[in-house]
């Protein structure tokens, strides 16, 4: 959990300073922001081609009625930020 907290709070990425690499990690949510879904789809299409994209984005439902879903699911803050970039 402490590593996830560090990734959320930010790591030094050069002159830009500390940058958070993941969204809020204390969540049970399975939902993802539309902007994040579109960014991921664009990255997959440009990197791997349309054969790797589903016809429709998958929809997930929460299995736990006590889930804490105030935040979206844990995900990278940007799929465009890679180890090479």
Image (tube, rainbow, N blue to C red):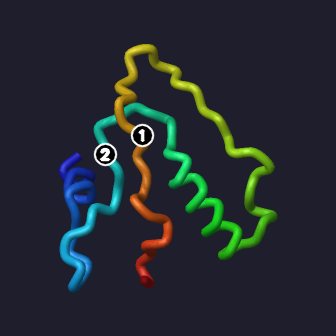
For residue 21, side relative to residue 58 (left or right):
left
Q: Nearer the viewer, residue 26 or 71?
A: 71
Q: Nearer the viewer, residue 36 or 63?
A: 36
Which residue extends farthest top? 65
| Residue 56, placed above or below residue 53 | above
Quadrant of the image for the C terminus? bottom left
As measured in the structure, the alpha-carbon distance from the residue carrying label 1 to the one carrying label 2 is 8 Å
- The location of residue 76, given as percent across then percent down, is 42, 58
Q: Secondary structure at mark 1?
A: loop
Q: Residue at x 35, y 50 (%)?
A: 23
| Residue 78, placed above or below residue 68 | below
Q: Nearer the viewer, residue 74 or 1?
A: 74
- The location of residue 37, given as percent across then percent down, is 57, 52
Q: Residue at x 81, y 64 (%)?
A: 51
| Residue 13, placed above or below residue 50 | below
Which residue extends farthest front? 35
- The location of residue 17, given as percent across then percent down, is 19, 76
* Disc number for residue 72: 1
First in sequence, mark 1 or 2: give its number. 2
Q: Residue at x 60, y 32 (%)?
A: 60
User: How many other residues sit within 10 Å of disc 1, few (<14), some (14-19) or many (≥20)?
Assistant: some
Q: Residue at x 27, y 52 (%)?
A: 4
For residue 31, side relative to residue 16 (left or right):
right
| Dots 1, 2 in contact, CB < 8 A | yes
* Disc number for residue 16: none
* Disc number for residue 24: 2
> Where, by quadrant of the figure, is residue 73 drawn?
top left
- The location of residue 62, given as percent across then percent down, is 52, 24
| Residue 42, placed above or below residue 65 | below
Q: Secondary structure at mark 2?
A: loop
User: How many other residues sit within 10 Å of disc 2, few (<14), some (14-19) or many (≥20)?
Assistant: many
């Amino acid at each position: 959990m402490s590593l996830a907290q560090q990734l959320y709070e930010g790591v030094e990425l050069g002159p830009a300073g500390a940058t958070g690499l993941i969204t809020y990690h204390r969540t049970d949510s399975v939902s993802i922001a539309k902007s994040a879904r579109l960014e991921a789809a664009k990255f997959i299409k440009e990197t791997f081609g349309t054969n790797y994209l589903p016809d429709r984005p998958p929809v997930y439902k929460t299995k736990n009625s006590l889930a804490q879903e105030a935040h979206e699911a844990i995900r990278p803050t940007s799929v465009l930020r890679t180890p090479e970039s």
